[in-house]
Amino acid sequence: MLVVHPGPNVGRSSKRVLPVAAQACFALVLSTASVEAQDMLIQTPAAEASSAWIVTLTGTGIVSPKYEGASAYGLSGFPSVGFRHADEPEEFSAPDDSLDYTLFSTSGWKVGPVVNLRSGRSVQDDSRLSGLRNYPWAIEAGTFVEYWPIQDRLRMRLEVRHGLHRHDGFVADLSTDLIQKFGAFTVSGGPRASLADNNTMEREFGISPAGALRNGMLPAFSAHGGVKSIGLEAALNYDWSDRWRTTVFQRYNRLIGDAGASPITTRLGSRNQLTFGLELTYAFELRSLYGLAPHLRRAVW
């Protein structure tokens, strides 16, 4: 029997006993409230974990040819950002991967949109380009497909992108990476190949008759679509802690086909294209609690 005692100022003789129906209802309410309170205590950590994100900020510095086919090198840099749920494992990403977002994935496949920033070319890069058509930097958007024949060890990736300028064309980049961890070090790398359509090849390596006349040094040349380059990339990561990572990488491309035969390449530049890069990465936790506005909090991992 459930007995409810009034406050301490009420005498013992005024004690009241609830009717049986009221006792049952009151017991049910207390039991439900107790279960809900326990569920809140149990679910709170899970709710916090499901609303937490790991944000990865990366700064990249690159020494590379000033334009496609150039023999002179320049320094450039750019930032990038990545997001993942706190309960998701970190995914492998090669230094030359474009920014992507996975929409569909299975145990061995990943598919989603991709965005890349393409460099441009102007006479300021090389005065010998005078009279030729310049082209500006541009954003390329498209799709990527990844396949892992050996999970966490061997990755194959295809990116197909199209520039957002009116006269841009399609490009397709294929890569294969073998990944191996040695404690805090991760070594990765593999072959590369790049293909381009007529619009892209003509923009980067073609010379119109009018442009050849204005330039006075280079003959007219019509560049057609096909394989633009083949090469190899290697990267070395070192995890200083769960927050900080340093990556050094190098890529070699050999221009072939019309890209390698263009006078822009043979007379002004080089078929051999080298890229050297350094990345510094910092990760922290972004947490949102119970639907409130998210706030930044550095994770202590």
Image: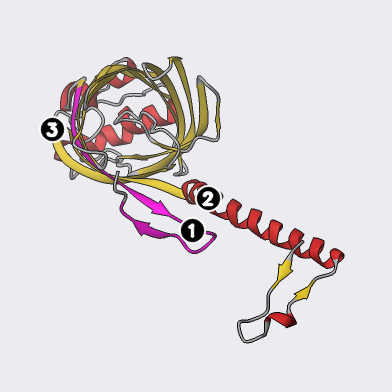
Q: Is residue 207 visible?
A: no
Q: Mark 2 Cα within 10 Å, few/some/many (few <14, many 20+)?
A: some
Q: Position of residue 240 (x, y in %)?
A: 18, 36
Name the image quarter holding residue 100. top left
Vertical relation: 95 (above or below) 291: above
SS under mark 2: helix
Q: Sequence-wise, which precedes: disc 3 or disc 2?
A: 2
First to last magenta residue range? 273-298
Query: What's the residue type where badge 1 is placed?
Result: Leu
| Residue at 54% over, 60% down | 291
Query: What's the residue type where badge 3 is placed?
Result: Ala
**Residue at the disc numbered 3:** 72
Q: Is residue 114 visible?
A: yes
**Residue at the disc numbered 1:** 289
Q: Position of residue 45 (x, y in %)?
A: 48, 49
- Verify whether residue 108 appears in magenta: no
Mark 3 to mark 1 CA distance (whole Å): 52 Å
Instruction: Pick the quarter of the image with the N terminus.
Output: bottom right
